[in-house]
Amino acid sequence: RASASSYLSSHSLCALKSLGHRMPAPVRRQSGGASWPEPPLLNAWISKAQSARALLQLHAQHGERMDAMHLGNLWNKLGRHLKWQTASGEMGDSLAGLAAATQSQLEAHGCRRPDILANIAHGAAQAMGADAPAARGLFDAIARAAADACAKPRCEPRHLANLAWAFATASQPQPALFDRIAAASAPLLGGSFNAQEIGMLA
């Protein structure tokens, strides 16, 4: 089977073209002769990508420059494009590679932002489906980071609901995380959650 990197690199030029002419000006930073997109520009490319393939191609080209914020945006968009579809073959390999790269990013650098963790989890649950073997390590890494993030003041009801829904939908049992989500949610049940969010927690 073709690796994610070999498949995606062969389509790198197509990826940039598929993003269209509305891209921001390619302001770049240089160091030692190398250049790469500035973080805001890279995030804009992710936001404007028109397909799951274009998103995965962007990761193949610029994944080494992506931090948790970029990956959260990327997974969020992937979830929308691949919602409930079955990704197999080369696309499945590409998703597995992205999951492994995201896991490595979280394990190496962590993430304290519950919104980013919720975006990654929610997008991965939609893009990879229930109990995808490649997703297990990723969801373990999200759970470890989210256990602390859930207790932070900036963790909003929607973040808690999205995390709970994502882990349940992806068939990724994480009892310790579910306990943290329950503890953080309990004081907010008097009116902070809307009806949809309460349904996602159930």
Image (tube, helix red, strand yellow):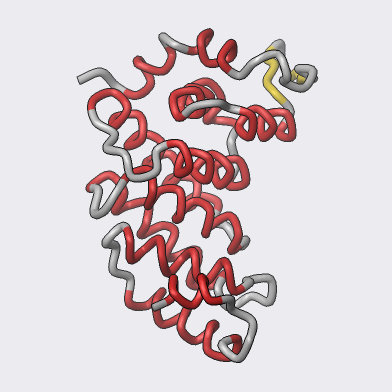
Image coords of residue 110 (percent x, y): 54, 56
Q: Residue at x 28, y 68 (%)?
A: 173
**Between 49 and 134, which is closer to the camera in this rendering?**
49
* Residue 154 spot, x, y in % from top left: 68, 71
Q: Quadrant of the N terminus?
A: top left
Give the vertical position of 24 relative to 86 (above or below): above
Image mark count = 0
Q: Residue furthest front?
A: 195
Q: Residue drawn at (29%, 29%), measured in percent from left and top?
A: 93
Please provide percent x and percent y for residue 128: 32, 44
Report the residue at 49% width, 43% height from top: 75
Residue 8 placed where, x, y %? 41, 18
The quarter of the image holding the C terminus is bottom left
- Asked if residue 82 is positioned above or below residue 31 in the image, the reply reads below
Confirm whether residue 199 shows in the render.
yes
Q: Is residue 90 above or below residue 103?
A: above
Q: Which residue reaches farthest left? A: 1
